[in-house]
Image: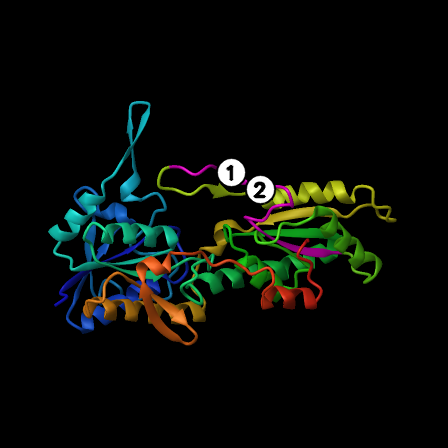
C-alpha cells in the first residue's frame, strides 16, 4: 500500500499551485498517507535532497496564495543538469540520482505539478523505474489532454483588466494601444482576453499577421466608425507573415528559449505602415505594454482555485490507489486521468478555423490575416 509520496512544483510559477498542494496533502493525509514536499522542483531530488514534511499545519492558509510554497524552477531538468568547470559548460545526466533519492526517502511515488516540460521529465523518470502522477499546470493552456489547465483563467482575467485600463488611456490620447501577453506558441490567453476585453485586433501564433491588414483595421475604425483609438492584443509568440517568432534568448540545455519583442515588432511595423496617413492630427501614436510576469502572480481566481482543489484531490486518490504514471485532467465537468505519455503527446493550439476564431471575426475582431 502507498504510505509516503513526494510532491513537487516545476516550471514557471502559476496561480493555483498552492491550492493543489493544499488539496493533495489534505486528501492524502485523510487516507493515512504521508506527504513530503520537494523544494525547487526536481532539483530538490538532486544531491542530498531538499524535502520537508507537509501536513495540515504546514499547509495552513496557503489555499488562496499565489506562487508556490515549495519553490519552482524552469531550469531543473535532472537529465540535462548544467555544471560549470572553469569556463566550460558541462551537461550531466543525473536522472538515476533522482530515482535513487526517491527510494532513499521511502517515497512510493511522486505527484509532479507542472506543464509539458515538468511532465516530460516525469515521464522520463518512469522509464527509469519511478512512479509519477502528473497535475497539468500552465497559464498557456497548451496541454491537449485536458480541457483546461489551472492558472489559465487567472492570467486571462489579469490581461482583460489591463485592456479595460488601456482602453481609457488610449481613448483619451488618440492612441493605438498594444498589449503583449504570454502564451508561448499558443494564442489562448490573447484570444480569450482580447474577446473579453473588447480588443479590436487579436494576433496569435496560429495565424501569422499582415501588418498592412492591421493598419487597415485601425484606419477603418477612424474613418468608418468614428473611433480615435484601437486596442490590440498580441501573443508573445505571434509573428508577421513570412517571419518567425522573436526570441530574447535561445533555448539551452534543459530550458526553452525565452520569447519577447512581439509587441515592439508590431509597434515598429505599425508606425511605418501608418506614417503616411493623412489625418488632420497626423498618424496616431502607437504605444506598447508588455504585461509579462504579472500574468503569473497573485491569487488564483475562483475557477482556478476550484479545479486546482479538484486536481489535487484526484492526484492524491490516484497515488493512494497505486494508479501511477497518469495525469489528472478536466473532461467536460469531470476530473479524469490519462496515461502520462498521452498527456504530453501533442500540444493544444488554437484552431484557426475553430468556433472561437469564427466568433471573434463575427463580432468584428481582426486576426491580422
User: For this view, does 53 lie left or right of residue 18?
Assistant: left
Residue 116, image x, y percentages: 38, 54
Picture layout, residue 37 above or below residue 240: below
Q: In the displayed image of the protein, which residue is found farthest to the bottom?
A: 333
Picture layout, residue 321 above or below residue 350: below
- The residue that mark 1 highlights is 248
Magenta-colored span: 229-252
Residue 244 tag number: 2
Residue 348, image x, y percentages: 47, 59
Picture layout, residue 248 above or below residue 202: above
User: For this view, does 241 lie left or right of residue 173?
Assistant: left
Residue 299, image x, y percentages: 42, 62
> What residue is drawn where x is 56% and y is 61%?
351
Question: In which image quadrant can residue 65 be found?
Answer: bottom left
- Magenta stretch, main secondary structure class: loop
Question: In which image quadrant can residue 126 be found?
Answer: bottom left
Amino acid at each position: 500500500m502507498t504510505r509516503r509520496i513526494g510532491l513537487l512544483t516545476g516550471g514557471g510559477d502559476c496561480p493555483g499551485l498552492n491550492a493543489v498542494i493544499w488539496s493533495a496533502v489534505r486528501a492524502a493525509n485523510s487516507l493515512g498517507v504521508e506527504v513530503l514536499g520537494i523544494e525547487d522542483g526536481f532539483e530538490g531530488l538532486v544531491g542530498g535532497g531538499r524535502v520537508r514534511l507537509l501536513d495540515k499545519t504546514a499547509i495552513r492558509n496557503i489555499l488562496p496564495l499565489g506562487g508556490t510554497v515549495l519553490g519552482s524552477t524552469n531550469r531543473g531538468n535532472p537529465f540535462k543538469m548544467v555544471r560549470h568547470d572553469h569556463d566550460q559548460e558541462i551537461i550531466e545526466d543525473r536522472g538515476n540520482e533522482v530515482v535513487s533519492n526517491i527510494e532513499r526517502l521511502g517515497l512510493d511515488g511522486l505527484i509532479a505539478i507542472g506543464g509539458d516540460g515538468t511532465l516530460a521529465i516525469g515521464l522520463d523518470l518512469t522509464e527509469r523505474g519511478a512512479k509519477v502522477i502528473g497535475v497539468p499546470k500552465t497559464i498557456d493552456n497548451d496541454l491537449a489532454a485536458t480541457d483546461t489547465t489551472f492558472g489559465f483563467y487567472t492570467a486571462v482575467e489579469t490581461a482583460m483588466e489591463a485592456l479595460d485600463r488601456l482602453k481609457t488611456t488610449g481613448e483619451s490620447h488618440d492612441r493605438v494601444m498594444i498589449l503583449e501577453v504570454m502564451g508561448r506558441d499558443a494564442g489562448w490567453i490573447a484570444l480569450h482576453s482580447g474577446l473579453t476585453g473588447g480588443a479590436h485586433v487579436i494576433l496569435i501564433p496560429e495565424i501569422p499577421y499582415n501588418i498592412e491588414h492591421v493598419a487597415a483595421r485601425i484606419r477603418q475604425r477612424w474613418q468608418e466608425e468614428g473611433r480615435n483609438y484601437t486596442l490590440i492584443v498580441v501573443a508573445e509568440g505571434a509573428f508577421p507573415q513570412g517571419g518567425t517568432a522573436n526570441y530574447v534568448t535561445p533555448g539551452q540545455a534543459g530550458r526553452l528559449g525565452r520569447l519577447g519583442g512581439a509587441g515592439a515588432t508590431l509597434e515598429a511595423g505599425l508606425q511605418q505602415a501608418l506614417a503616411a496617413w493623412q489625418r488632420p492630427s497626423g498618424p496616431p501614436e502607437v504605444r506598447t505594454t508588455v504585461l509579462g510576469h504579472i500574468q503569473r502572480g497573485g491569487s488564483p481566481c475562483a475557477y482556478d482555485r476550484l479545479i486546482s482543489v479538484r486536481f489535487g484531490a484526484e492526484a492524491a486518490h490516484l497515488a493512494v490507489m497505486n494508479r501511477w504514471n497518469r495525469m489528472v485532467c478536466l473532461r467536460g465537468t469531470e476530473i479524469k486521468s490519462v496515461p502520462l505519455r498521452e498527456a504530453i503527446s501533442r500540444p493544444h493550439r488554437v484552431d484557426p478555423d475553430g468556433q472561437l476564431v469564427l466568433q471573434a471575426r463575427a463580432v468584428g475582431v481582426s486576426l491580422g490575416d
